[in-house]
Amino acid sequence: MIGGLFIYNHKGEVLISRVYRDDIGRNAVDAFRVNVIHARQQVRSPVTNFARTSFFHVKRSNIWLAAVTKQNVNAAMVFEFLYKMCDVMTAYFSKISEENIKNNFVLIYELLDEILDFGYPQNSETGALKTFITQQGIKSQHHTKEEQSQITSQVTGQIGWRREGIKYRRNELFLDVLESVNLLMSPQGQVLSAHVSGRVVMKSYLSGMPECKFGMNDKIVIDKQGKGGTTDDSGKSGKQSIAIDDCTFHQCVRLSKFDSERSISFIPPDGEYELMRYRTTKDIILPFRVIPLVREVGRTKLEVKVVIKSNFKPSLLAQKIEVRIPTPLNTSGVQVICMKGKAKYKASENAIVWKIKRMAGMKESQISAEIELLPTNDKKKWARPPISMNFEVPFAPSGLKVRYLKVFEPKLNYSDHDVIKWVRYIGRSGIYETRC
Amino acid sequence: MPAVSKGDGMRGLAVFISDIRNCKSKEAEIKRINKELANIRSKFKGDKALDGYSKKKYVCKLLFIFLLGHDIDFGHMEAVNLLSSNKYTEKQIGYLFISVLVNSNSELIRLINNAIKNDLSSRNPTFMCLALHCIANVGSREMAEAFAGEIPRILVAGDTMDSVKQSAALCLLRLYKTSPDLVLMGEWTSRVVHLLNDQHMGVVTAAISLITCLSQKNPDEFKTCVSLAVSRLSRIVSSASTDLQDYTYYFVPAPWLSCKLLRLLQCYPPPEDGAVKGRLVECLETILNKAQEPPKSKKVQHSNAKNAILFEAISLIIHYDSEPNLLVRACNQLGQFLQHRETNLRYLALESMCTLASSEFSHEAVKTHIETVINALKTERDVSVRQRAADLLYAMCDRSNAKQIVAEMLSYLETADYSIREEMVLKVAILAEKYAVDYSWYVDTILNLIRIAGDYVSEEVWYRVIQIVINRDDVQGYAAKTVFEALQAPACHENMVKVGGYILGEFGNLIAGDPRSSPLVQFNLLHSKFHLCSVPTRALLLSAYIKFINLFPETKSTIQEVLRSDSQIRNSDVELQQRAVEYLKLSSIASTDVLATVLEEMPPFPERESSILAKLKKKKGPGAVSNHLLKTRKACLTDIKGISTPSPSADLLGLRAGPPVTAAAPSAGSLLVDVFSEAGVNDDGFLRFVCKNNGVLFENQLLQIGIKSEYRQNLGRMYLFYGNKTSVQFVTFTTTLNVQAKPVEPLIEGGAQVQQVINIECLTDFSDAPLLNIKFRYGGALQNLTLKLPVTINKFFQPTEMASHDFFQRWKQLSLPQQEAQKIFKANHAMDTEVLKAKLLGLGMALLENVDPNPENFVCAGVIQTKAQQVGSLLRLEPNAQAQMYRLTVRSSKDTVSKRLCELLAEQF
């Protein structure tokens, strides 16, 4: 189990140090600083091992979070915990920065005491934590004695993520499907690798202890229903079903039911939470196609032409489009011409960055650049790194569709129809690259 | 040097550097650098020409970026342009960039060379210096090709400034080190040597480094520098501290120059010219005298400078190794340092003393400090100094103090640092072997060594003990007794078990007479350790067990039981299992005769260089080896001089630390031949073989002759092994024998061994042994050697067992006076019952127990088989422990036989 947890700033100074077990000494703090933060070569592995001590680290902007252990722990569990910890901290004081950590160090120690016990991860549900860890800005909503006494029973009870007796005048539910699409394409337009990793994030403001059921166009479910015999349904939705490679759920989802019926039913936590995560690799809709054209004119000049084509319904609008065209290391000057958006040569990043605010579907746009080169005596050829792209589109590139989200609350007198539901799809670029 | 002009502050560079310093993260730093690089690229690419100042600034920035660890692949051209500038700072930056960044195969090298050439031919000394520094910093082969001819000219030209001369000398030195074939001094030699007379001390200092390096390669050409160096040295040494002004360092005149001069002199033998030599000795004496004077300053720099010269002088004295007076003085001076509170001084003193110890003149003087050194070994806090102390003890060891030193090293070993333990163990092992006067001490020491530091005792060490014990029959009994006692300790090291297993397996019979170490007790003792040992040791023990079966038939059933047990015969280790199965079968199927042949006592090992010594050399690296070899050679040669007639101690010499194979090259040959010619007929080995069939018959620096023989009734076969111990081949190697023998290979390669077989048939009884004449050529000199072959009448004995009354009946039958031969003689060796028994058994007769009414006495019976007849013989040996005398009576059916046997045996006890 986790023996200790340290938070460092970019200089390697320790901001937070919490040791849970005796086998982790003070020197572990220094070992990580010396061997990872100040290492000569950049350490790329998130897990490092020195002197029979394992260090698991994640980096958030300039802050290093490192979990330390001497035991043979499940690394995935440790990282899951570290990410969760980041989420919790973000929920309490928004951005994780050196400044914020220094300002909230009492809170962080209190949180660490709660979410890790003797190195074993405990309840890290933000909503639940906020009920009893109340520093500074977060005020407890429960002032009465009865309510405070309820906290214990709730946290230790079967449904630790939701307390009883929640009441809303308007029962509302927000559901976001957030996907990031990753692509590597050859210059000829052949897809070398592509996958989508997605999350279903919910915000629920429901009274009582409702039971929810979530349905999507999962291929297995659709196929099963097709066989089941509802004849009119199977023909229509069969085409649009998607194959999910793997998925993980929030702790509130009843896994036994998912295993047997593949239905996702749960009692939701109050407020914001991540219902599930999934990954797909088949039949991905690629929102943009990048067509590069690079021509070397002699030793001192390079001509680049890049065309991007949007590949979705014309009625939809893509936003925050950014194309990054790497330039050779001996670039001495760049001239850019583009029809749409703004393009600029950023010397500090060795790239031309082309930004377009908005772009509708089934359109295309083009940029051309002349790059002047300084002759060098180095015979090394330019490696031609891939052109990368960033964007945001209002649909799910994996093809996922929410079919239903039903709410049952038998005790209180509101039905599924009374709940106001909002569904939103956002597709973002992950690593979206085209070789040139 | 021109003053830095006002506009040269290079503010842009300062801003850039402070930007980099202020970067919060590595990524930010990389971004800043990328931006700057793009800026510089666009500036260099830009249409309008840059002025010298901005060029210099950007080149400086590039240099800084390069030093931060980023690749720079442009800007070289601009740097080369800077070389042709007339401003000092611009030129300097250009040269700096080029020395740091230009790789030798660059296309620009021609341009650079051109610029350097221009600067060298300019009359401006600063520019010349810059160019010379650049050549030295790059130091590539191309540079050497381009400028190797030019620089010596600058160096010796009369009108060159002193500072340029210094740079030129050092630059030439650098080029010489990278490509010595290109730097040809030829005509310049004498003029370079005369730089030693230069007015300017700096020039002399620089030149002397060059001369030292050059003279190491071709000492003859630079021979003239010796007298110049001596006179320069004497001028410095005799000068007062105020004479040399700038070159006086804390009251010491020109310490660096003095050290370099002394080091240069170490490249040459002592000067032959009496006057020069006298002057040099005077200098050295002055230096030694100065060390005695009270210090002129309390500052550490003063004493450092003074001692640096002193140590260099001492190493020169050691190098000459010809002035006993100076050597002894140096030794005394070092002796003072041994107790100095400065750790470095103690270290250096010990180190220099190590070399002093190898000089014959100062060896005795070094030995007087033994107490201090031992004390240093025990109390010194710094481990490296302790290590030196151990080295010195090793170096100063000789026969007179070996026991003390070995004892001290052994006692230190218990507390020694882990890092030096293994080396200490090797050293103790070597010293013990080298200076062993009596081998029981050697055995004791090594067993002690194993007991104290078993983990650090390498295989070689215990192999060596066993080799020595096997080759020397006079310690075998003692060794067996000692290991037996050592094994009785409740916890003993595995190496001890190995030695014990081997020795008891071979010589357990020698102590079996004592009921406390009866065969069964020995076996049980060994077997009690068996289960705690590793597989190789167990394998060795199994072999020891089967040897026990041969030595002591009474243990057979017990040992077979052990071998038969599941843990042996079904052992998961293949080696152990195979041994168990094979030994079990061997012991149950083979007859006693076969067993005795198969499990015969191991033949003596051929003498070779001690493997331990080889290991120590390997550890020490080549430098130490030559030193050590030199020493052993000296020791060996003096020993050979000392021994005029072959005596038992000559044999000891042969066994000692391994005669240095390489040292015995032809040069040493002439000395060795003397030993040969003096030897005449060598029968020293002969007598040892009366009771023994295998062993080393003869050995000297060149040749070793081993014997292995077997006899049955009146027939015998003898194998002679001629081992060439040198690295040179023996030519026309012939042996002639007055018995028929197969011819032997006429050539023995260096280090090789050839074998010769001689078949022997005893026709009738005899008293003269056959003579073996060996002739061969070694390094041109003809070597001639005559040896008595150890074929004696007793070899043809057939043992006869008989009861008490039978014996006395026959004894009485042989009562004719001529049939009896009797001798009363003094004991040569200790009167050990077990040893006596072993010897009598080796004689070939049957040893009859419980026959003589006096249990102290030994009686034996046997029949000598010759072709013509059989001669029955009876023997009675009465030891008198008080008087250390023996009475030996031999009766046999033939009078000549009795007489001969009596003569032979009288020499044995």
Image (cartoon, coloured by chain):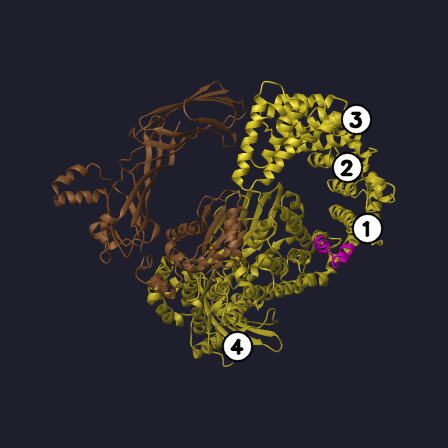
Chain colours: A brown, B yellow
Label 2, label 1: how many angstroms apart (C-alpha)?
23 Å
Do the residues at pointers 3 and 2 share their chain? yes
Q: Nearer the viewer, mark 4 or mark 1?
A: 1
Could you tell me the amino acid type at mark 4? Answer: Asn
The residue pinned by badge 4 equals B857
Instruction: State which tag comes first along the sequence, 3 or 4.
Output: 3
Q: Quadrant of the C terminus of chain A?
A: top left
Could you tell me the amino acid type at mark 1? Answer: Leu
Tell me which chain the residue with mark 2 is part of: B
Instruction: State which tag comes first along the sequence, 2 or 4.
Output: 2
Instruction: State which tag comes first along the sequence, 1 or 3.
Output: 3
The residue pinned by badge 3 equals B160
Above-or-below relation of B326 to B583: above
Label 3, label 4: how many angstroms apart (C-alpha)?
99 Å
Q: Nearer the viewer, mark 2 or mark 4?
A: 2
Q: Identify which residue, B10 or B804, lies in the foreground.
A: B10
The residue drawn where x is 38% and y is 62% is B594
Tell me which chain the residue with mark 3 is part of: B
Whether residue B345 is in magenta: the answer is: yes
Magenta span: helix, strand or loop, mainly?
helix
| Residue B295, percent from left and from top | 83, 53
The residue pinned by badge 1 equals B288
| Residue A274, percent from left and from top | 34, 48
- Label 3: how many residues lie within 10 Å, few (<14), some (14-19) or many (20+)? some
Q: Secondary structure at mark 3?
A: loop
Which disc is residue B205 wearing? 2
Q: Identify which residue, A398 or A435, lies in the foreground.
A: A398
Above-or-below relation of B60 to B512: above
Above-or-below relation of A386 to B556: above
